[in-house]
Image: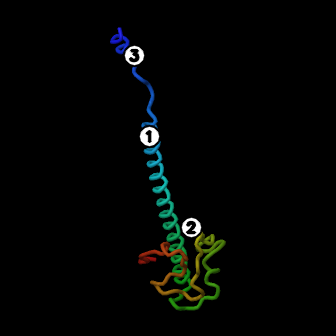
Amino acid sequence: MKFLLLQTRLPRRGMTLIEVTLVIAILLGLTSVLFLGATAYKRGSDRAICIQNIASVQKAVRSYGNLAGLKPGDFVPNLKDEIVGGDKFVPFEPVCPSGGSYLYGGNVLPAGSTLYLDCDINLHEPKNTNGW
């Protein structure tokens, strides 16, 4: 009779504490990888936006110099005001998405390889400015 009772017993349902703990640990690990990836993506996109802002201002300075018949090294009073704002080359003053601040190059039209706008965050500087 004992043998018969052992065979008719239903298998246990559910998970043990160790199995639940293991599932939770795996889910936490996957979630942390997701957040690390999202943070790296955000940093990269902020850097790309900042470099695009620098490129836009640089191209605006070049365009202004070409239209006004100026050469690199020429003095332009209020150069920033001539290119940024309202109906100018750059309608709005650019803002660094990472909270950095921009430093404008003054009132002298920069040479071809010199940037007019610079971000104070080191990683936001472009590696190559050819064609700007």
Helix, strand or loop at disc 3? loop
Instruction: Give the labeled residue for mark 1.
Output: 23
Farthest residue to the left: give it. 3
Colouring convention used in this rendered image of the protein: rainbow
Helix, strand or loop at disc 1? helix
Instruction: Give the labeled residue for mark 3.
Output: 9
**Which of disc 2 and disc 1 is earlier in sequence?**
1
Q: Residues within 10 Å of mark 1 (few under 14, many from 20)?
A: few
**Which of disc 3 and disc 2 is earlier in sequence?**
3
**Which of disc 3 and disc 1 is earlier in sequence?**
3
- Residue at 64 percent of width and 85 percent of height: 78
Farthest residue to the bottom: give it. 74
Helix, strand or loop at disc 2? loop
The mark closer to the camera, 2 or 3, is: 3
Q: Observer-nearest residue: 89 or 53?
A: 53
Amino acid type at circle 1 is Val
Instruction: Give the labeled residue for mark 2.
Output: 98
Amino acid type at circle 3 is Arg
- Residue at 34 percent of width and 10 percent of height: 4
Q: Position of residue 123 (x, y in %)?
A: 48, 73
Quarter of the picture containing the N terminus is top left
Tag 1 and tag 3, C-beta contact below 8 Å: no
Q: Position of residue 104 (x, y in %)?
A: 58, 81
Q: Residues within 10 Å of mark 2 (few under 14, many from 20)?
A: some
Tag 1 and tag 2, C-beta contact below 8 Å: no
Q: Observer-nearest residue: 6 or 98?
A: 6
Real-space CA distance between mark 1 and mark 3, rounded to the nearest whole angstrom: 28 Å
